[in-house]
Image (cartoon, grey):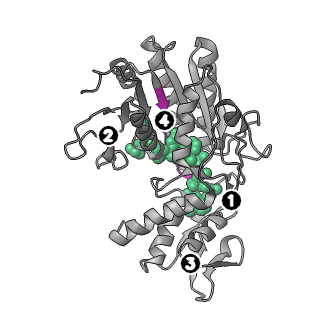
């Protein structure tokens, strides 16, 4: 059966090739959706996370997943994709999603993350689908930024601390505005950090699990991090894409915090990753001079490098997801320890097979 022939529900995902896009596509395919994805053109392959979702991965035969070249900076192509696919649900996950990079590429980040959301909403409107489409916006705990209240919930005041956070704030409010102005079924999922073996390699959790796996295999002696004191409410991406879908199945559109309700520091993440390989880390010094030493061997495993610091940091994030729990019974199924174990197991096996990975 070809895409478009079926009576299946149709979903369109921007950012389908990213961590969340790949898990969401998997989830929607398992629920019998026809899934369309917006893919950025790249000079190298960027479909590694979704390769297995083709009807036939060897020949790239599409099955119920179809990819469309497009970009959130190109409004006319977005309108054309919406018009071709006539989606029931649109998930806007595409973004320049790296907070530190956003300080170096502020204008680009705003173009993609802020105006991109507006372009996608306008594309839906220009196709006269605003009363039909259920729209999900990948909003973020980065909106909370500088701590105003603990734990953070839907009513906590926003105070973003990066060009990324400010861009996502625009997207968040334009979604609310289009909901109120045009009666669109549009939701913001205010998701706290979520990770997985598919997490991008430059985010702190994946950087840690990849490095510790290499250390376990003798492929690396030590690695450098930035702010070890930052605390995050880390969940598993597989649990979080479930929440995205659930939000769009409700009777009324609304905004929801999705979080585990548990915060850990970067330092604790490092300790847990080393614990997984049977090593204990002891910390000495502080700030830029802090080092993590392997107990008994005295080998320095972790150093601090100021190049990984941000001009303005988000020190502490802890979410309260009770609204999502009460409304549609969402709760995380994996603990912090499960998350680290899943990522470590994956990266250990990967580095064992290919030390250059
Ligand atoms: P990723 O960085 O893994 O994925 C982002 C995706 O967006 C990638 O596929 C990327 O393409 C694509 N993309 C980037 N720029 C554009 C563009 N100009 N046009 C179209 N697509 C583009 O992020 P995650 O999967 O982790 O996150 C998904 C969304 O959720 C993002 O919007 C992120 O900001 C937000 N978010 C993430 C959280 C997290 O903890 N993971 C928490 C809260 C919000 P390519 O593959 O080619 O790079
Ligand atoms: P974050 O994730 O900024 O929370 O944004 P990231 O993993 O990049 O940083 C988390 C915390 O770790 C500190 N840190 C380091 N970070 C990186 N990347 N590299 C390091 O070496 C390092 N050392 C310490 C950071 O300073 C920070 O405090 C993620 C993204 O997915 C966003 O798109 C999303 O919106 C938020 O999570 C919720």
Q: Earlier in the sequence, mark 1 or mark 4?
A: 4
Q: Earlier in the sequence, mark 2 or mark 1?
A: 2
Work out which residue is located at the far right of the displayed protein and give it. 149
Ligand 1 within 8 Å of the CB at mark 2: no
Residue under numbered circle 3: 278
Ligand 1 within 8 Å of the CB at mark 4: yes
Observer-side mark, 1 or 4, equals 1
Location of residue 5 in the rendering, given as x and y in whole percent from the top left corner: 27, 21
Observer-side mark, 3 or 1, equals 3
Q: Secondary structure at mark 1?
A: strand
Q: CA distance from mark 2 to mark 1?
A: 37 Å
Location of residue 338 in the rendering, given as x and y in whole percent from the top left corner: 57, 59
Q: State the residue at coordinates (68%, 59%).
A: 264
32 and 98: which is toward the camera? 32
Residue under numbered circle 2: 41
297 and 284: which is toward the camera? 297
Q: Secondary structure at mark 3?
A: loop
Residue under numbered circle 4: 112
Q: CA distance from mark 1 to mark 4?
A: 30 Å
**Label 3 neighbour load within 10 Å: few <14, some 14-19, many 20+:** few
Q: Earlier in the sequence, mark 4 or mark 2?
A: 2
Q: CA distance from mark 3 to mark 2?
A: 42 Å
């Amino acid at each position: 059966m070809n895409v478009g022939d079926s009576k299946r529900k149709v979903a369109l995902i921007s950012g389908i090739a990213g961590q969340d896009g790949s898990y969401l596509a998997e989830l929607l395919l398992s629920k019998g959706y026809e899934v369309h994805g917006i893919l950025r053109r790249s000079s190298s392959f960027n479909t590694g996370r979704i390769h297995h979702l083709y009807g036939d991965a060897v020949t790239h035969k599409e099955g119920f997943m179809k990819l469309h070249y497009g970009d959130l900076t190109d409004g006319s192509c977005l309108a054309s994709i919406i018009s071709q696919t006539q989606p029931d649900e649109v998930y806007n996950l595409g973004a320049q999603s790296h907070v530190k990079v956003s300080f170096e590429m502020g204008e680009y980040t705003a173009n993609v993350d802020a105006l991109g959301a507006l372009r996608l909403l306008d594309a839906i409107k220009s196709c006269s689908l605003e009363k039909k489409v259920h729209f999900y916006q990948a909003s973020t705990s980065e909106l909370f930024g500088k701590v105003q209240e603990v734990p953070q919930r839907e009513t906590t005041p926003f105070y973003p601390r990066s060009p990324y956070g400010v861009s996502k704030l625009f997207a968040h409010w334009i979604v609310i505005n289009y909901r109120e102005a045009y009666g669109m079924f549009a939701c913001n999922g205010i998701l706290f950090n979520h990770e997985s073996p598919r997490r991008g390699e430059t985010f702190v959790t994946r950087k840690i699990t990849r490095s510790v796996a290499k250390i376990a295999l003798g492929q690396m002696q030590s690695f450098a991090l930035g702010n070890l004191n930052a605390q995050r409410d880390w969940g598993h991406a597989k649990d979080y894409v479930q929440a995205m879908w659930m939000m769009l199945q409700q009777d009324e559109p609304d905004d929801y915090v999705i979080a585990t309700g548990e915060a850990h520091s970067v330092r604790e993440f490092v300790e847990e990753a080393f614990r997984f390989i049977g090593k204990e880390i002891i910390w000495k010094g502080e700030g830029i001079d802090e080092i993590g030493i392997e107990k008994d061997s005295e080998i320095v495993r972790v150093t601090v490098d100021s190049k990984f610091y941000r001009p303005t940091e988000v020190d502490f994030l802890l979410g309260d997801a009770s609204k999502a729990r009460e409304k549609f019974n969402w709760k995380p199924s994996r603990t912090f320890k499960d998350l680290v174990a899943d990522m470590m197991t994956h990266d250990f096996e990967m580095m064992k097979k290919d030390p250059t990975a």
